[in-house]
């Protein structure tokens, strides 16, 4: 069975550029989560969706970050404009529902120069 | 104070050793507890849930002390393949079951 799929796996960009990260959750999962991991702050939840609806976006750092889930099989996390402090590993995870085990994708390693 | 705090580590142990990780959480309303494992440059994966009565899965034993707001993970007869970062995770209904992660403790098992 396919797990959570994320693309791209690596992204190097220059400050000020727009970055779009993509995620395909496990089929049949109703909850989708975006996390960011850094050495300084560890793993932090940015936003999560339930049945394609954003439920909690309190972790989104600022207006430069936005996330969408247009359908049950696709989500995007966009950073515009990107800044060097956005450099991190971004993980997407999905679960059957918000109380069930979350399965993480392989992550996108973002470097903003 | 951080909501979930773990031993800073790193832990370096020989194969066959027993190693214990500790974790404390600050919100007494926390309801569910987990240990996740994260290999180098990989995604986190659920290792085991932690139940009030304590639970065991092979060489791994997890304990919860609600009164002290303390969680532990014991690994017996450690293997080289146990080398990873171990993340303590808590969640509660009032946070919409949001997973709150500790920063993790790095374990290296040496031959």
Image (spheres, rainbow, N blue to C red):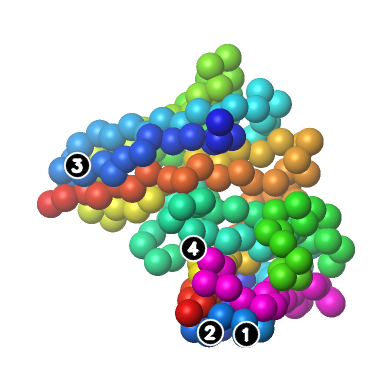
On screen, residue A55 versus residue B32, left or right, reads: right
Q: Chain of mark 1?
A: A
How far apart marks 3 and 2 lie (CA) works out to: 41 Å
Q: Bin the neighbour count of mark 2 within 10 Å (Cα to Cα): few under 14, some 14-19, many 20 and up.
A: some
Q: Chain of mark 2?
A: A
Residue receiving disc 1: A17
Alpha-carbon distance for marks 3 and 1?
A: 45 Å
Whether labels 1 and 2 belong to a single chain: the reply is: yes
Q: Are the residues tagged 3 and 2 within 8 Å (C-beta)? A: no
Where on the picture, by quarter, is residue A49?
bottom right
Q: Which residue is mark 2?
A: A14
CA gap, disc 3 and disc 4: 23 Å
Q: Which residues are magenta?
A: A67-86
Residue A17 screen position, x and y as percent: 62, 85
The front one of A109 and B85 is A109
Chain at tag 3 = B
Query: Is residue A55 shown above or below A112?
Result: above
The residue lying at 61 percent from left, 60 percent from top is: A35
Asked which secondary structure carries label 3, the reply is strand
Q: Is residue B77 left or right of residue A62?
A: left
Residue A85 lies in the magenta-colored region: yes
- Residue B60 x, y percent position in the rendering: 39, 38
| Residue A17 vertical placement versus B100 (above, below) | below
**What is the number of the mark on residue B43?**
4
Are discs 1 and 2 less than 8 Å apart at CB?
yes
Mark 3 sits on what residue? B13
Q: Secondary structure at mark 2?
A: loop
* Residue visible at 55% across and 35% down in the picture: B2
């Amino acid at each position: 069975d396919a797990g959570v799929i994320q693309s791209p796996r690596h992204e190097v960009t220059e400050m000020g550029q727009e970055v779009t990260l993509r995620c395909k959750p496990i089929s049949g999962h109703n909850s989708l989560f975006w996390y960011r991991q850094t050495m300084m702050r560890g793993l932090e939840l940015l936003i999560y969706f339930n049945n394609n609806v954003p439920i909690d976006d309190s972790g989104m750092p600022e207006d430069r970050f936005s996330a969408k889930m247009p359908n049950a099989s696709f989500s995007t996390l966009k950073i515009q404009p990107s800044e060097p402090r956005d450099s991190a590993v971004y993980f997407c995870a999905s679960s059957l529902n918000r109380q069930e085990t979350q399965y993480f994708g392989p992550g996108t390693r973002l470097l903003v120069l | 104070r951080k909501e979930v705090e773990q031993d800073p580590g790193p832990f370096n142990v020989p194969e066959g050793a027993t190693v214990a990780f500790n974790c404390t959480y600050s919100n007494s309303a926390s309801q569910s507890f987990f240990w996740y494992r994260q290999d180098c440059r990989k995604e986190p994966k659920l290792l085991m849930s932690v139940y009030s009565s304590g639970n065991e899965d092979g060489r791994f034993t997890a304990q919860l002390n609600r009164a002290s707001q303390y969680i532990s993970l014991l690994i017996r007869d450690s293997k080289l393949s146990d080398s990873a970062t171990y993340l303590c995770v808590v969640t509660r209904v009032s946070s919409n079951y949001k997973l709150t992660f500790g920063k993790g403790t790095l374990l290296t098992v040496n031959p």
